[in-house]
């Protein structure tokens, strides 16, 4: 049964981690700016998801102890490192502090949408996770779900390089729009949605990037390189805009109480630098890992060809690429793709700069920060809020 399911699991594997992703949210807890590290917002939902993933993976390794998949210790460390990153982001004082310090919030987002998904997906955990599920559940639950045509079609659509890249970058840019970012900080349901979309889009993105299957079953490695290039270039202008701006645009942190007396402009400058530099450096690490995976895949394919095996392509384009019919054409397409990435990013930063500059509801010069229509209060409440003491963030509810 494990062998039968593994073929389906290669495309559905990331969904096995959704138990932890669905619980990627803020949680209730006592907060104190004076002793923030004394409060650990441990919650049953997140802990159950993380422990279940760890146990299934360990159980699967025991089931596969005689197979080569059980011998990759670096991958095992990467998988558990990804789970530890989720724990650090959601179950430690970092989660409490992120509600009051913009820069720490950006560090939490880097863990959720970047570091944790990259470590989880570079470990290619599909085989151990499937093998770790009890046989009865594999037969009665997992097999029908993985074999469902609708489920397969939806995942194939979401896992396309263009689609998952747009989703990955879209979650970054949408949740950095000041109105939506502040609304999420003040609203539990939106905060829940923010964390779930970041973690899930990151898992989809890095699953496509580190998919061990070569083309035509997986995305061509040249396309994966373009995906990572887009992610790196997208971090740079967004981080630069937030770092170099001269006004404060994330005013919700002042409403809930910005901790430790950090100046709002300094807080947002540090947050912009986190998006600009560490996130981009993480992308470069992913590029190095992808190049290594690309080389390993080409070596395996060459060995198969030398032994007389052929890989049947699923479409004419793949056949031409694999047979080397027009390698120059493939290189030209890759070059044009890489050239279009910075152009699209620069267009995006211009649009964002215009929005931050000219949208009156996003302007901090008015003295208050207006949330979207669904999150606004009446004018009387806004007037009272100016003189009211800092409020506790409602984003720590379960939504």
Image (spheres, grey):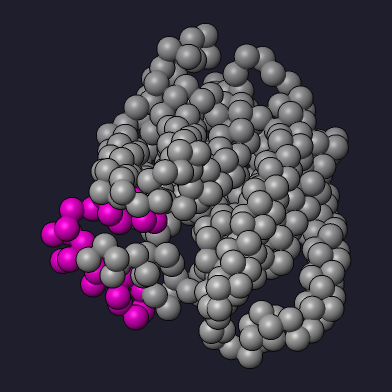
Where residue 6 sits, quadrant-wise, is bottom left
Residue at image coords 55%, 29%: 98
When the figure is inspected, residue 163 is found, relative to residue 232, above or below; the finding is below
When the figure is inspected, residue 351 is found, relative to residue 143, above or below; the finding is above
Residue at image coords 47%, 22%: 93
Residue 394 in magenta stretch:
no
Q: Is 162 displayed left or right of 45 in the figure?
A: right
When the figure is inspected, residue 292 is found, relative to residue 337, above or below; the finding is above
When the figure is inspected, residue 48 is found, relative to residue 314, above or below; the finding is above
Residue at image coords 42%, 57%: 14
Residue 135 in magenta stretch:
yes
- Depth check: give the residue in front, 348 or 228: 228
* Residue 319 in sight in this render: yes
Give the percent coordinates (x, y) of residue 191. 48, 44
- Depth check: give the residue in front, 396 or 300: 300
Q: Magenta segment range?
A: 126-151
Where residue 364 sits, quadrant-wise, is top right
Q: In which quarter of the image is the N terminus?
A: bottom left
Q: In which quarter of the image is the C terminus?
A: top left
* Residue 290 in sight in this render: no
Q: Is 270 displayed left or right of 74 in the figure?
A: right
Where residue 59 sits, quadrant-wise, is top left
Give the percent coordinates (x, y) of residue 34. 52, 9
Residue at image coords 45%, 32%: 84
């Amino acid at each position: 049964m494990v062998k039968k399911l593994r073929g389906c699991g290669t495309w559905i594997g990331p969904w096995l981690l959704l138990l932890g992703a669905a619980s990627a949210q803020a949680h209730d807890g006592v907060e104190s700016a004076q002793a923030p590290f004394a409060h650990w917002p441990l919650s049953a939902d997140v802990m159950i998801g993380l422990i279940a993933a760890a146990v299934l993976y360990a159980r699967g390794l025991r089931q596969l102890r005689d197979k080569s998949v059980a011998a990759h210790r670096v991958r095992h460390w990467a998988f558990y490192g990804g789970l530890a990153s989720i724990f650090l982001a959601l179950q430690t004082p970092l989660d409490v502090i992120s509600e009051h310090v913009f820069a720490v919030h950006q560090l939490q987002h880097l863990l959720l949408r970047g570091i944790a998904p990259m470590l989880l997906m570079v470990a290619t955990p599909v085989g151990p996770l499937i093998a770790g599920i009890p046989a009865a559940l594999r037969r009665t639950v997992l097999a029908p779900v993985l074999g469902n045509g609708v489920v397969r079609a939806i995942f194939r659509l979401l896992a396309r390089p263009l689609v998952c890249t747009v989703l990955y970058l879209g979650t970054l840019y949408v949740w950095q729009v000041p109105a939506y970012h502040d609304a999420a900080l003040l609203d539990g349901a939106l905060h829940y949605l923010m964390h779930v979309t970041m973690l899930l889009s990151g898992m989809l993105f890095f699953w496509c990037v580190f998919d061990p299957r070569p083309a035509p079953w997986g995305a061509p490695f040249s396309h994966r390189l373009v995906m990572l290039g887009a992610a790196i270039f997208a971090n740079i202008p967004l981080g630069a805009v937030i770092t170099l701006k001269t006004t404060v645009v994330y005013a919700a942190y002042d409403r809930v109480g910005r901790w430790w007396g950090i100046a709002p402009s300094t807080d947002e400058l540090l947050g912009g630098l986190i998006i600009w530099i560490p996130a981009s450096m993480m992308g470069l690490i992913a590029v190095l890992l992808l190049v290594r995976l690309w080389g390993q895949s080409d070596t395996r394919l060459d060995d198969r060809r030398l032994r007389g095996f052929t890989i049947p392509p699923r479409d004419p384009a793949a056949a031409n690429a694999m047979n080397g019919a027009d390698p120059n054409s493939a290189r030209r397409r890759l070059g044009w793709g890489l050239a279009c990435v910075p152009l699209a990013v620069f267009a995006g930063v211009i649009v964002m700069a215009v929005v931050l500059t000219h949208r009156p509801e996003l302007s901090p010069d008015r003295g208050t920060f207006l949330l979207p229509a669904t999150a606004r209060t009446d004018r009387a409440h806004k007037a009272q809020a100016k003189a009211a003491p800092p409020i506790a963030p409602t984003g720590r509810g379960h939504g």
